[in-house]
Amino acid sequence: MMIRQASSEIINGIRGRMVMDLFRKISETVSKGVSTATEKAQQTVEITRLNSQISSKRKEIEKLYGDIGAAVFNGYLNKDLSLAEPKVIPACEQIAAIRHEIDTLEDRIMMIRNEKECVCGKKVPFDTRFCPSCGHRFPEPSAQAERNAANPEPDQTADADTTDITGNMQEPEPAAASDWSDVGRALPVYRMEEEPFPGERAQDIADACPACGTTVEAGARYCPSCGTPVSS
């Protein structure tokens, strides 16, 4: 009788520990899932806010385009286009400055998405060593750059997007156009495309790299890990 009772207590103790371990694992899984979902939601909110700033700045550029056109047309009516230059040159400089701000915001979005941009224009995950599109080899990132990509700092310019674009700029201003002939060259080209998070791309895995075995996305021409050409 005592042996049976002792055996029952041992079994109940084992069952109790198993139940506790199960609850602990479930709790850890749920906590991890909630943390991941919260982080993703915060990233989505931040990217939405940055895209809103970019949209606002592009509207500023459109308005400046209109100001330039009006100034040039008034010069045409007066048969002297040089009359428009005092208005056109400052407007062009403002556009160049706003485009520079847009580049900074887009770089911030790529950092949040843990991406980087290749010389060919393709956006790839930050830890990619070779561009899967053109085969370009990325320089080895510094330890600090890797930490920044993994844990991007909050945007410190969040409240500065409504300030006058001619106010104090923390970033160096692009080169100004010196005359009518180089107005176009003074304006840097800025990126317009927007892409989803890397994990949200609807791409299939095509095959494994014949050299290192890394899985390669459908349509990739080069292995992102070792740079070996692969068939698409």
Image (tube, grey):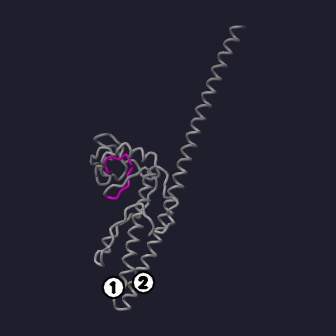
- Does residue 20 belong to the magenta stretch? no
Residue 82 is marked as 1
Image side of residue 100 versus residue 46, left or right:
left
Relative depth, front residue between 25 and 86: 86
Residue under pointer 2: 70
Q: Is residue 7 above or below residue 142?
A: above
Callout 2: SS: helix
Q: Which residue type does callout 2 highlight?
A: Ala
Relative depth, front residue between 25 and 40: 40
Relative depth, front residue between 199 and 203: 199
Residue at x 32% of width, y 54% of height? 133
Q: Residues within 10 Å of mark 2 (few under 14, many from 20)?
A: some
Q: In this view, does 181 lie above or below 161?
A: below
Give the mark, 1 or 2, whose residue is nearer the N terminus. Answer: 2
Residue at x 42% of width, y 63% of height? 169
Question: Where in the figure is residue 70, as x and y percent of width and height?
Answer: 42, 83
Q: Residues within 10 Å of mark 1 (few under 14, many from 20)?
A: some
Residue 203 is marked as none
Residue at x 71% of width, y 12% of height? 5
Magenta region, residue range: 120-131
Q: Which of marks 1 and 2 is in front?
A: 1
Question: Where in the figure is residue 175, as x and y percent of width and height?
Answer: 32, 68
- Does residue 123 belong to the magenta stretch? yes
Query: Quadrant of the image for the N terminus?
Result: top right
Task: Characterize the magenta stretch by its predominant secondary structure.
Answer: loop
Question: Where in the figure is residue 200, as x and y percent of width and height?
Answer: 47, 52
Callout 1: SS: helix
Q: In this view, does 197 lie above or below 35?
A: below
Q: Which residue type does callout 1 highlight?
A: Ser
